[in-house]
Amino acid sequence: MKALTQCWFTRMHIPEGRAHKEDDGSHTSWCRHCERPIVSWDKARWFLADGFNVTHLAETVGGRFLFVVDSLEEAMIARYPVRDLPDEAAIEALKAELRERHGIGKPGSTLELHDSGAKPAERRKLADKRARRVAPTGRSSPLSASY
Ligand SMILES: [Zn+2]
């Protein structure tokens, strides 16, 4: 039997060498501790890709995917292609269906839904919105105007 690896205790898998950039926007590598295939979307958190031939899938299918990952086990448990869906509304509908099917967002659930094709423009829009909320509005307050 193999000795327990560092990542078994820490739940942190560390990529061995350079990560491989996949067509769908994910990164794949091998964990230097447990030597299992791992996948990441931000190169910060790595998930076990056991059971998936990630590279092979990306090569043969490509495009955008929705991923279901277990944040407790740090493992990817399902992957759904969305390239055959006609528009964003259909993708949103699939996301809602997957959240329902996997119980994502329910109390006690450790599952998360990821979208490999989340557009940089949309992320920027969200960041802008957040920045605007904390920015000063420009008008002086009633208190400072009374002198
Ligand atoms: Zn590992």
Image (tube, rainbow, N blue to C red):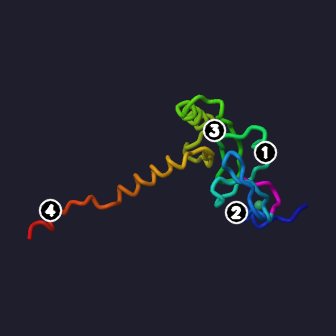
Residue picked out by circle 1: 52
Measured in 3D between alpha carbons, the distance from the residue under mark 2 to the one under mark 4, in whole angstroms, is: 52 Å
The quadrant where ligand 1 appears is bottom right
Could you tell me which secondary element the residue under label 1 belongs to? loop
Front: mark 2 or 4: 4
Q: Position of residue 45 (x, y in %)?
A: 65, 58
Residue 131: tell me if it is visible: yes
Q: Residue at the bottom extreme?
A: 147
Q: Which residue appears at 27% of the width and 58% of the height?
A: 137
Residue picked out by circle 4: 142
Boundaries of the magenta span: 34-39
Q: Residue at the right extreme?
A: 1
Q: Position of residue 31 (x, y in %)?
A: 78, 61
Q: Amino acid at mark 2?
A: Met
For the residue carrying disc 4, how many other residues have a C-alpha within 10 Å: few (<14), some (14-19), or many (20+)? few
36 magenta-colored: yes
Figure check: 1 above or below 147:
above
Q: Is residue 20 left or right of residue 112?
A: right
Residue picked out by circle 2: 12
* Ligand 1 lies under 8 Å from the Cβ of mark 1: no
Residue picked out by circle 3: 102
Measured in 3D between alpha carbons, the distance from the residue under mark 3 to the one under mark 4, in whole angstroms, is: 52 Å
Front-most of residues 9 and 76: 76
Q: Which residue appears at 71% of the width and 44% of the height?
A: 77
Nearest to N terminus: mark 2 or mark 4 = 2
Q: Which residue appears at 76% of the width and 50% of the height?
A: 49
Nearest to N terminus: mark 3 or mark 4 = 3
Could you tell me which secondary element the residue under label 4 belongs to? loop
